[in-house]
Image (cartoon, grey):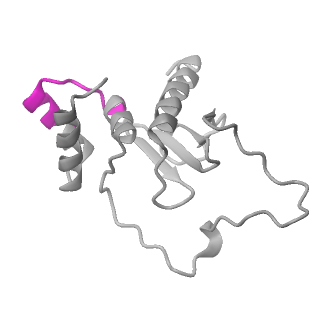
Amino acid sequence: MTLTPEQTQAVRDWLADGATLGDVQNRLRADYGLHLTFFDLRMLVMEIGAQVKDKETQVEADDVTKAKLPPKPGDQAAPQQPAPGAVSVSVDTIQAIPGALVSGSVTFSDGEKARWFFDQMGRFAFEPELPGYQPTPEDSRAFQAQLQTELSKRGY
């Protein structure tokens, strides 16, 4: 679904003011007559680059467990990066996330990785390895398309 520039800005403003996805869904319906599923709304928010203010996450300055380090010179087993524009989506065969209906991972074209899942209420969660990471709009669209394809293969 494509929003007008006015509608896109309204969604960004609502989210910046602390609205939840449910609030945005209701306001789109009330103000513009748009009926979006929760999944479609979540994908739309990712596509326009807006962020939902769910909860505050505090990261210690010395938390090096999340730091990305360049490969050491001479490392022969350096991980392969996807080709530019390539997004790779996988679906877990065994659910390791408590309460998740379906989950998996995604690697974006810039090599950043994230976990995703849908809980039993159908809510979508996206957890990047690098705190605060946002994929590009092109990567978001590719992720949405591949995720829908992978989930439809599995009957979701």
82 left or right, relative to 131: right
123 left or right, relative to 83: left
Q: 84 or 11, which is in the foreground?
A: 84
Q: Which residue occupies 47% across, 31% down?
A: 141
- Magenta extent: 25-39
Q: Position of residue 13 (x, y in %)?
A: 18, 49
56 left or right, relative to 142: left
Secondary structure mostly taken by the magenta-highlighted segment of the chain: helix
Q: Which residue occupies 26% across, 43% down?
A: 21
Q: Is residue 118 above or below residue 145?
A: below
Q: Is residue 21 above or below residue 32?
A: below
Question: Is-magenta flag for residue 1?
Answer: no
Count of numbered circles on the image: 0
Q: Position of residue 102 (x, y in %)?
A: 53, 35
Q: Is residue 59 above or below residue 131?
A: below
Quarter of the image where one finds residue 7: top left
Q: 87 or 54, which is in the foreground?
A: 87
Q: Which residue occupies 62% across, 74% down?
A: 64
Q: Quadrant of the N terminus?
A: top left
Residue farthest left in this picture: 31
Q: Position of residue 9 (x, y in %)?
A: 20, 42
Q: Is residue 34 above or below residue 76?
A: above
Q: 36 or 92, which is in the foreground?
A: 36
Q: Position of residue 98 (x, y in %)?
A: 52, 48
Q: Which residue occupies 52% across, 53% down?
A: 128
Question: Is-magenta flag for residue 34?
Answer: yes
